[in-house]
Amino acid sequence: MIAGDPWQGGASWSVLQYVLGLMRMGHDVYFIEPIRPGALFPPDVPLAQSENAAYCEKVMREFHLEGRTALLAGSESFGLSLDEVKNVTSRTDVLFNISGLLTDEELLDPIPIRIYLDLDPCFNQLWHEVQGIDRHFSRHNRFVTVGNSLGEPGCSVPTCGIDWIKTFQPVVLGLWPAKGTPIVYDGLTTVANWRAYGSVEHNGVFYGQKAHSLREFVQLPTMSTEKFLLALGIHKDEKKDLEALAQSRWHLLDPAEAAGTPQAYQRFIQSSKAEFGIAKSGYVLSGCGWFSDRSACYLASGRPVVAQETGFSSYLPTGGGLFPFQTSEHVLDAIEQINRDYLFHSRSAASIACEYFESSKVLHRILERAGLC
């Protein structure tokens, strides 16, 4: 989503990397987003007068995507008209359908290659398999996931009988240069939502959110002289957690200011010293191999990443620019190594991004494995 939950710069970038990356490869790309019932803000206004439309228009104008975008809400459209959208889908070769959000069969059926793009491994599969929630797998004929361990030993996520194409997240490196932006946030930073959506319990395991992961490390800043700065979306009623974070010297930043637009989000990352990347506990406990598109942007910007282990270390080089952690001691050791030779780890981070996340490499590999080139 871009407009379904507006003023979330990081969520916008996770979609834009695919749109812009495919365009830079020479493909003719359109972005279509259905808005869920009840997701318009403010409620009970026409789509064109909503914050959703205003934010989408701002983002698309900044990235020169006018005329290539449509928001759909019931019988309303914003940007391209519904007839124009139907014309586009009638001549489209391939659909990248993020979490199966586009469900209109009139738009889906004419497209010969329909890729289900799973950016939320563990949860999509458990919702489908355990809770019986229709994730719309049946409407697709190719399946791509950023859970690189799905189907591998040690990963508890059901494959749902699907042969998943596994991938890293793409980053358009031309838009994310490692150009040595001055450090403003002198410490370990990240952008996160305390809670995002419903957790899942399966076989006695509770697959939870970032709140459940971060609570295990709440004392971490008291163990280090390094600053920990979180652009954290957390409700004011989470009083117990807010008090614990404050007592343990976490620096909480306004996420709307730090990351409310794609540009702000990018400035925040590129102005940070390094990332402390916390993962949803579902990703951690499942061992699904998820690696954050946000962390990939830190790496591309030449900012070292200390990321909670989800199994990704089986697929990415670690120890130079990228450090997996399972305990507070792992984090403290990574900080010591980064501070000992920051330039080396900065260059190593950018090198990892170039090798593993560069958008044309990632997207070409997906298209190739989907039988499109």
Image (cartoon, helix red, strand yellow):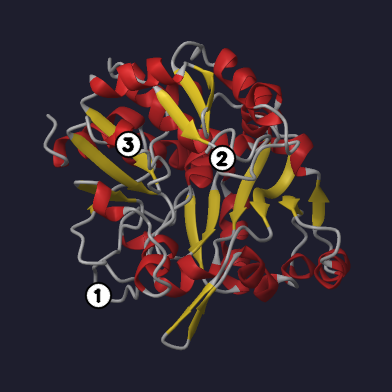
What residue is drawn where x is 56% and y is 47%? 341
Q: Eyeballing the image, is 337 above or below 69?
A: below
Coordinates of residue 250 in the picture (x, y in percent): 80, 59
- Element type at mark 3: strand
What residue is drawn where x is 61% and y is 70%? 213
Closer to the camera, 108 or 350?
A: 108
For mark 2, what is the residue? 11
Comes first in the chain, label 1 or label 3: 3
Closer to the camera, 287 or 370?
A: 370
Residue 58 shows up from this direction: yes
Q: Amino acid at mark 1?
A: Pro
Give the CA distance from mark 1 to mark 3. 28 Å
- Element type at mark 1: loop
Where, by quadrant of the figure, is residue 367 drawn? Answer: top left
Q: Give the left or right position of residue 152, taking residue 267 as reference.
A: left
Where, by quadrant of the figure, is residue 128 drawn? Answer: bottom left
Coordinates of residue 184 in the picture (x, y in percent): 75, 34
Q: Please identify, in this view, whether the residue under mark 2 or under mark 3 is nearer the observer.
A: 3
Q: Give the left or right position of residue 31, taking residue 137 as reference.
A: right
Q: Please identify, in this view, whether the residue under mark 2 or under mark 1 is nearer the observer.
A: 2
For mark 1, what is the residue? 153
For mark 3, what is the residue? 96
Q: Amino acid at mark 2?
A: Ala
Q: Give the left or right position of residue 323, taking residue 158 as reference.
A: right
What residue is drawn where x is 77% and y is 54%? 227
Q: Give the left or right position of residue 112, taking residue 120 as reference.
A: left
Q: 10 Å neighbourhood of mark 3: few (<14), some, or many (≥20)? A: many
Give the CA distance from mark 2 to mark 3. 16 Å
Q: Please identify, in this view, whether the residue under mark 1 or under mark 3 is nearer the observer.
A: 3
